[in-house]
Image (tube, rainbow, N blue to C red):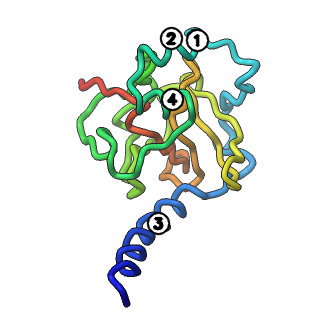
Amino acid sequence: MSITKILLISAMVPLMFVARACEQSEPDSLMKGDQKNTKKMKEHKFKIQKSEEEWRIVLGEQEYHILREKGTEPAFTGKLYDNKQNGIYLCAACSEPLFSSETKFESCTGWPSFYKPLADSAVLEESDDRYGMKRTEVRCAHCGGHLGHVFPDGPEPTGLRYCLNSAALDFEAE
């Protein structure tokens, strides 16, 4: 086998793992009976309103791509995926508190994962059918920034995995 084929195969194996981890389909109700904030994004009145030009000024290039263009950072590269400190995770665009270290868990996906937000009203969820996958997008309810996705393969008590981009979050240690 040629060195090119070996390199190609070794590059594809981790990508297949990551793609599988993020392609889980969702059940009809992710919250097992809890009331979720599933109001349509177009109907929601975000407290922070900025033009895309204003967002480009206040966010770095990677943060803008993820928070405003619904991008994704490469797995295992984010500043917070392996963070073990106690504290609060904030939206990187507007500093709104979103998740607690108490609900963070090791998902082996390469992105920070939580089983629930600080409050249901902190995030909005909306169906995302891009790339041929049925997923649920998670956005900051305060500014509308794209955070990541939620999947039904997390630990109890919710059974959810909020799989988020590190670049969409800031961290405030206790």
Q: CA distance from mark 4 to mark 1?
A: 13 Å
Q: Which residue is mark 3?
A: 17
Q: Position of residue 32 (x, y in %)?
A: 66, 45
Q: Are marks 2 and 3 in contact (CB under 8 Å)?
A: no
Q: Which mark is residue 54?
A: 2
Q: Earlier in the sequence, mark 2 or mark 4?
A: 2
Q: Secondary structure at mark 1?
A: loop
Q: Secondary structure at mark 4?
A: helix
Q: CA distance from mark 2 to mark 1?
A: 5 Å
Mark closer to the observer (4, 1) = 1
**Type of residue at label 4?**
Leu
Q: Secondary structure at mark 3?
A: helix
Q: Earlier in the sequence, mark 1 or mark 3?
A: 3
Q: Are marks 2 and 4 in contact (CB under 8 Å)?
A: no
Q: CA distance from mark 1 to mark 3?
A: 37 Å
Q: For residue 30, which quarter of the picture?
A: top right
Q: Position of residue 157 (x, y in %)?
A: 51, 46
Q: Residue at x 62, y 39 (%)?
A: 137
Q: Nearer the viewer, residue 33 or 138?
A: 138
Q: Which residue is mark 1?
A: 51
The residue carrying pointer 1 sits among few (fewer than 14), some (14 to 19) or many (20 or more) residues within 10 Å by Cα, namely few
Q: Which mark is residue 139?
A: none
Q: Secondary structure at mark 2?
A: helix
Q: Which mark is residue 67?
A: 4
Q: Earlier in the sequence, mark 4 or mark 1?
A: 1
Q: Are marks 1 and 3 in contact (CB under 8 Å)?
A: no
